[in-house]
Amino acid sequence: MSKVIAGVKPVVADKDSRKAIYRPIIGALEDSDWDTQDECVGEDEAYDEIYFETYPNDSDD
């Protein structure tokens, strides 16, 4: 997912647009038993928001 973020973030300035891109990708990867979602936290605020919406109990708060 880090490579997806690295490819999307520089060319899509709007955070909501990036979230719209990341959301179905995350869903597709989840369907394939993806288990390293947390390793991308911190790379893009848009990804982080979707991650913590999906996994609210994983927040450090």
Image: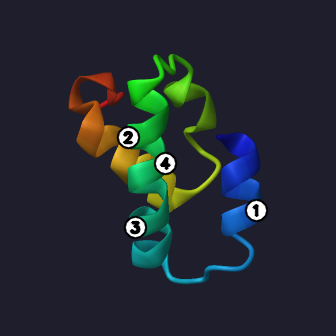
Comes first in the chain, label 3 or label 4:
3
Taking the spot 71% from the left edge, 79% from the top edge, the residue there is: 11
Q: How far apart are marks 1 and 3 (CA)?
A: 15 Å
Taking the spot 76% from the left edge, 57% from the top edge, the residue there is: 6
Which amino acid, by three-letter code, is at mark 4? Answer: Ile
* x and y, in percent, of residue 54 in the image: 27, 38
Q: Do the residues labelled 1 and 3 touch (CB within 8 Å)?
A: no
Which residue is disc 3 drawn over?
20
Q: Are marks 3 and 2 in contact (CB under 8 Å)?
A: no
Work out which quarter of the rendered image holds the C terminus and state it.
Answer: top left
Q: In which quarter of the image is residue 40?
A: top right
Which residue is disc 4 drawn over?
25
Comes first in the chain, label 3 or label 2:
3
**Of the pair 13 and 29, the residue shown nearer to us:** 29
Comes first in the chain, label 2 or label 1:
1
* x and y, in percent, of residue 14 in the image: 51, 82
Taking the spot 69% from the left edge, 52% from the top edge, the residue there is: 4
| Colour option used | rainbow
Of marks 4 and 1, the one in the foreground:
4
Q: Are marks 2 and 4 in contact (CB under 8 Å)?
A: yes
Against 56, residue 13 (above or below) is below
Comes first in the chain, label 1 or label 3:
1
Which residue is disc 1 drawn over?
7
Q: How far apart are marks 3 and 2 (CA)?
A: 12 Å
Which amino acid, by three-letter code, is at mark 2? Answer: Gly
Callout 1: few (<14), some (14-19), or many (20+) C-alpha neighbours within 10 Å?
few
Q: Could you tell me which secondary element the residue under label 1 belongs to?
A: helix
Callout 2: few (<14), some (14-19), or many (20+) C-alpha neighbours within 10 Å?
few
Q: Could you tell me which secondary element the residue under label 4 belongs to?
A: helix
Which residue is disc 2 drawn over?
27
Which amino acid, by three-letter code, is at mark 3? Answer: Ala
